[in-house]
Image (cartoon, rainbow, N blue to C red):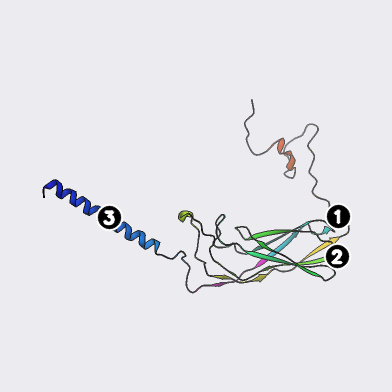
């Protein structure tokens, strides 16, 4: 075997060893479990909250009900990970009951519902959150996405919000009235409640059209 052949053989051997090492590292990572959850799993207390706007509201007018948990879903990342589920219990003034939902939260743990009361009087509204086992699904297909899977298999315990009273009156509640645009000379500062005045002035620099 000449010197050139020997060098070539050494390079091939080194390449083979490097390939074997890389394969071993890759096999190690691919054999790891998908999750990095702790053992044993935890049971985590939760607190559920609810609010309504407008309150009071007129009969047959739509009211916005907002509800949320004290903690966001721990695996939520954009479109991936767990979401909370809620139901809403409504007790009407005549004592009849109805359940709204289930509703799915956004990534930060809140959701909303639109509700139209049909009776005059006081409604009682409560949000319910059931026991929820964290799955981490759907998984982020991008391994570099940074989705936290520490709480997979943990149980977030059920909770019930404090009840709120929604007062429904015969007279309708009038919606927000925007301040009309000025028809004569106006001065700064512009009140921040004048939302339609953005056509006159704002905090954004916009190049003039030529």
- Mark nearest the camera among 1 and 3 is 3
- Is 196 above or below relative to 18? above
Which disc is residue 18 wearing? 3
In this orientation, which residue lies closer to the viewer: 97 or 67?
97
| Residue 74, picture quadrant | bottom right
Alpha-carbon distance for marks 1 and 3?
Answer: 77 Å
Residue at coordinates 32% horizontally, 57% vertically from top-left? 22
Residue 33 in picture, x, y percent from top left: 43, 66
Residue at coordinates 63% horizontally, 38% vertically from top-left? 204
- Is 193 above or below relative to 138? above
Q: In this view, which residue lies farthest toward the bottom?
A: 40
Alpha-carbon distance for marks 2 and 3?
Answer: 78 Å
Residue at coordinates 38% horizontally, 61% vertically from top-left? 29
- Is 153 above or below relative to 30? below
| Residue 38 colored in magenta in the image | yes
The magenta span reads 37-48
């Amino acid at each position: 075997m000449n010197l050139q052949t020997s060098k070539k053989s050494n390079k091939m051997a080194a390449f083979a060893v490097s390939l074997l090492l890389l394969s071993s590292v890759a096999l190690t990572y691919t054999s790891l479990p998908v999750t990095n959850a702790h053992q044993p799993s935890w049971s985590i207390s939760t607190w559920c909250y609810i609010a309504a706007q407008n309150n009071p509201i007129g009969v047959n007018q739509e009211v916005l009900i907002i509800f949320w948990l004290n903690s966001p879903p721990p695996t939520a990342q954009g479109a991936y990970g767990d979401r909370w589920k809620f139901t809403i219990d409504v007790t009407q003034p005549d004592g009849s009951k109805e359940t709204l939902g289930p509703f799915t939260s956004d990534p930060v743990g809140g959701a909303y519902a639109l509700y139209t009361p049909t009776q005059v009087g006081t409604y009682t509204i409560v949000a319910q959150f059931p026991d929820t086992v964290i799955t981490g699904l759907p998984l982020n297909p991008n391994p570099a996405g940074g989705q936290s899977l520490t709480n997979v298999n943990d149980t977030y315990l059920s909770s019930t919000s404090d009840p709120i009273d929604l007062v429904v009156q015969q007279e309708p509640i009038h919606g927000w009235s925007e301040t009309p645009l000025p028809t004569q000379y106006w001065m700064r500062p512009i009140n921040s409640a004048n939302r339609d005045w953005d056509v006159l002035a704002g905090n954004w620099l916009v190049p003039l059209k030529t």
